[in-house]
Amino acid sequence: MRSLATLFAAILALAASTASAKCDPSKWKPPVDGKYNTTSRIDPKKLNVHLIAHSHDDPGWLVGVDQYYMEKVQYILDTAVEELVRNPDRQFMFVEQSFFQRWWHQQGSEVRGVVKQLVKEGRLDLTVNGGWCMHDEATPHYIAMVDQTAYGHQLLMDEFGISPRIGWQIDPFGHSATQGSLLSQGVGFDALYFARIDYQDYGQRIKTKNLEFIWRPSKSRGKESQVFTGEIIDTYCPPGKFEYGNIGNEIQDDADLHDYDVCDEVDQFVKVAQDRGAVTKGNHIFIPMGCDFQYDNSRRWFKNMDKLIHYVNQDDRVNVLYSNLSHYTDLKRAEGLTWSVKTDDFMPYASADHDYWSGFFTSRPTLKRFARVANILLQQ
């Protein structure tokens, strides 16, 4: 037994030394008293990478809205609030009021007090989109789009005294002039960000560094309708292994273990940041850290983002920080850059060769009729 134990210990030591040979743990400052350094601020001399923690929560998709709330969303909000309290540098964005309002009305006075303080500090960011849902832009009548947006905004004003200032249309397939004018600048948004434009348009914007631009969709209103607009690179989910909701994507920073990977994690993230910075004007980019119904275990996400900020900023090639889209937008404005102007819409939409979504406009006419009639009845 002793010989087997000795052999096992030797194997572990060899594995640890092999990992250390690839990446020397001594080059990194460890967390102090178990806490990672996440106090990063803007560095004007570096590329600043804004981490936008979010969860994209469809009010009905593969299952119904009630199932999603019971199985996922209530835990997303429960654990996100808990993790924000743990670290004052952390921020989290939540968009869909259909879910948030249900959760809010189930909370007691203590949790409500905590949430109101987080909202006041801007760390629980409810100033993005703010509608009852993230409406599609191809099939609904504009009145339904206005109604659901106004309803969500009124709830936020009544409960928190805030007005959303950023548009976040990351999952509709194609983007309409109505959204760009009436439902962006028209409702007081300072910027609009989305993630689905035609793949050929996207490719051209990558080449010309025009992923961020001024959208002026109304011919009659001209500059009065324009809004600063950004197309998200790749998708609204994190790149590669930085989707921390997936088991196996954690940052392993225990030097005693064979799979210690801080160097690889830092190098991969810096490369992603530099690649994105190379196709973006200015020295600010944002990376969405979240995906569909993520953060039901917010601890997993925030602990790994804490590690990421702690180690990447020691590397010193880029500056990474927790942030929100209002802060990001204000910084882009302050850079005083010249932006291209887009004057038409983003329809029709194709996601790849021969993958056109034109059927949005012609299919299921009966369902669309029912939706239109129901909207009229509900207004009465």
Image (cartoon, rainbow, N blue to C red):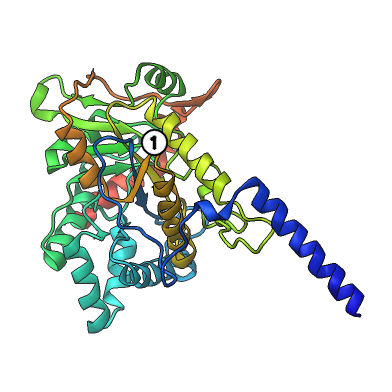
Residue 221: percent from the left, percent from the top?
Answer: 9, 24
Locate the N terminus by quadrant.
Answer: bottom right
Instruction: Tell me the quarter of the picture where residue 276 sits.
Output: top left
Q: Which residue lies furthest to the bottom in this view?
A: 109
Q: Is residue 73 above or below residue 109?
A: above
Q: Residue furthest front?
A: 26
Relative horizontal placement of residue 253, taking residue 141 as reference (left or right) = right
- The residue labelled by disc 1 is 195
Q: In this view, does 7 lie above or below 375?
A: below
**For the residue labelled by badge 1, is the local secondary structure a helix, a strand or a loop?**
loop
The residue located at (36%, 48%) in the rendering is: 51
Return the x and y of residue 305 as percentages of the image width and height: 43, 56
Q: Which residue is drawn at 39% across and 25% down?
A: 278
Q: Nearer the viewer, residue 149 or 23?
A: 23
Can you say which quadrant of the picture contains the C terminus?
bottom left
Position of residue 184 measured from the top left corner of the image (x, y, whole percent): 19, 38
The structure residue drawn at horizontal position 24% and vertical position 28%, both measured from the top left corner, is 177
Q: What residue type is labelled 1?
A: Ala
> Left of 196 or right of it: where is 177?
left
- Residue at left 46%, top 50%? 291
Q: Which of 37 and 100 is in front in this view?
A: 37
The answer to whether any part of residue 183 appears in the image is no
- Examine the rendering and report whether any part of residue 274 can be seen: yes
Q: Nearer the viewer, residue 331 or 46?
A: 46
Q: With respect to residue 209, does 107 lie above or below?
A: below
Pointer 1 local density, CA inside 10 Å: few below 14, some 14–19, many at least 20: many
x and y percentages locating residue 198 in the rendered image: 42, 24
